[in-house]
Image (cartoon, helix red, strand yellow):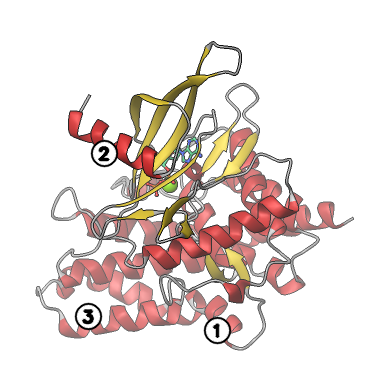
């Protein structure tokens, strides 16, 4: 074990006045943004025996999240709201520390930004082809939306402005193409052409929202399966975690991005383009789980645009990968020089497959919505 880290964790635990004594830690490697540790404390169980209690410590990545204090305010409001509504359910709870007499859910020394939550014994999956697990993940994200349906999203900060404004993502791409600082545009002309040709279709959701046709909701904005904790035995979903990007937004972003990631036959950066496509079984499982919780709360238009949202989110991410490639790979971490191009081609292959399957996807959505609206 790393002695410096142990000292750090002990200091952080003391600032949050955790009961008991620091005992050991394990790094949790499931996420790829923050540094996460399961930290074990040993304490008296009240009967003179030792009890081990784990806590979840996180050092927030302040390079990725420029406004960690606002981010924590968002998380605080959302988790406290959920706890108020469901006091007896399993919830995320952030421990408090104090600075100048003010109660805070974080410890920030100007350099490192730490927080502590209850540790939930569970399993998580990086990716998953088990339809039951995917269904349960859909249910968990759907439930997250539903429990927050009477929370006013305007109370939350836009910690990442225009995160899912597809029009703005396209503007950024066009600027990168025009600037072409690395002289790479000619290498990806086909990809530029595909995305620009389909701009209006990809921006349908953004345009509907800007036109006042879609409601503003609380959105999670990182609806990957590894952000759901599952029961180790039953694989039922227990809790949605990773609320760093919780913000006001449209439901289509959460649904579309989840499908984009989970239902692709390949990983999003696989160069096996022939295999890329939507696995309709996975799509169905996620849609059924999601709509089982949300069908009654969603508007007609929200439901009617869920299938299209998958296409929109796929194109949106492709524009971001492509712009990053043209700008010289400054945002997304690359493991080899062509990594971003492979990501772009993968996402475009997925978008093309979605175009072919959009009617089937919509039929599945409509079927699930009907079933759960009764
Ligand atoms: N409260 C918790 N209890 C148990 N495990 C957790 C908890 N919160 C997060 N985890 C685990 O830690 C991983 C990383 O946490 P997450 O908040 O998603 O960070 P990142 O932003 O790095 O993805 C999760 O994928 C999950 O496996
Ligand atoms: Mg995560």
Using the numbered discs, state the Cα–Cα distance from disc 3 to disc 1 in whole angstroms: 23 Å
Residue at left offset 49%, top offset 78%: 203
Mark 2 crowdedness (10 Å alpha carbons): few <14, some 14-19, many ≥20: few
In this figure, which residue is indicated by the disc labeled 1?
207
Q: Is residue 169 visible?
A: yes
Using the numbered discs, state the Cα–Cα distance from disc 1 to disc 2 in whole angstroms: 48 Å
* Residue 332 x %, y %: 25, 59
Q: Residue furthest left?
A: 182
SS of the residue under disc 1: helix
Name the N-terminal-most of marks 2 and 3: 2
Front: mark 1 or 2: 2
Name the N-terminal-most of marks 3 and 1: 3
In this figure, which residue is indicated by the disc labeled 2?
8
Q: Is residue 360 visible?
A: no
> Which quarter of the figure has residue 214?
bottom right
Using the numbered discs, state the Cα–Cα distance from disc 2 to disc 3 in whole angstroms: 45 Å
In this figure, which residue is indicated by the disc labeled 3?
177
Asked if residue 278 lies left or right of residue 11, the reply is right
Q: 34 or 370: which is nearer to us?
A: 34
């Amino acid at each position: 074990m790393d002695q410096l880290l142990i000292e750090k964790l002990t200091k952080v635990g003391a600032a949050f006045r955790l009961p008991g004594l620091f005992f050991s830690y394990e790094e949790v490697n499931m996420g790829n943004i923050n540094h996460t540790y399961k930290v074990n404390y040993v304490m008296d169980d009240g009967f003179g025996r030792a009890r081990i209690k784990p806590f979840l410590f996180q050092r927030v990545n302040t390079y990725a999240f420029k406004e960690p204090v606002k981010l924590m305010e968002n998380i605080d409001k959302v988790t406290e709201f959920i706890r108020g509504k469901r006091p007896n359910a399993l919830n995320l709870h952030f421990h408090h520390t104090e600075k100048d007499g003010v109660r805070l859910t974080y410890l920030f020394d100007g350099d490192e930004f730490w927080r502590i939550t209850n540790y939930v014994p569970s399993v998580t999956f990086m990716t998953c082809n088990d339809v039951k697990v995917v269904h349960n993940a859909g249910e968990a994200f759907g439930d997250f939306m539903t429990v927050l349906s009477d929370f006013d999203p305007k109370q939350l900060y836009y910690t990442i402005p225009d995160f899912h404004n597809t029009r703005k993502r396209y503007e950024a791409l066009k600027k990168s193409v025009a600037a072409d600082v690395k002289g790479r545009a000619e290498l990806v002309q086909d990809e530029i052409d595909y995305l620009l040709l389909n701009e209006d279709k990809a921006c349908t959701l953004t345009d509907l929202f800007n036109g006042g046709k879609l409601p503003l909701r609380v959105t999670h904005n990182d609806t990957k399966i590894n952000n759901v904790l599952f029961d180790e035995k039953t694989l039922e979903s227990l809790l949605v975690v990773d609320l760093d990007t919780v913000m006001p937004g449209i439901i289509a972003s959460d649904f579309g991005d989840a499908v984009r990631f989970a239902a692709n036959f390949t990983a999003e950066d696989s160069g096996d383009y022939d295999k890329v496509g939507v696995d309709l079984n996975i799509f169905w499982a996620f849609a059924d789980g999601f709509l089982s919780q949300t069908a009654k709360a969603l508007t007609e238009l929200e439901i009617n645009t869920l299938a299209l949202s998958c296409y929109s989110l796929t194109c949106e991410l492709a524009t971001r990968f492509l712009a990053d490639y043209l700008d010289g790979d400054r945002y997304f971490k690359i493991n080899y020089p062509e990594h971003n191009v492979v990501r772009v081609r993968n996402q475009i292959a997925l978008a093309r497959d979605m175009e072919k399957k959009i009617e089937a996807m919509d039929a599945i959505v409509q079927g699930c919505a009907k079933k759960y609206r009764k």
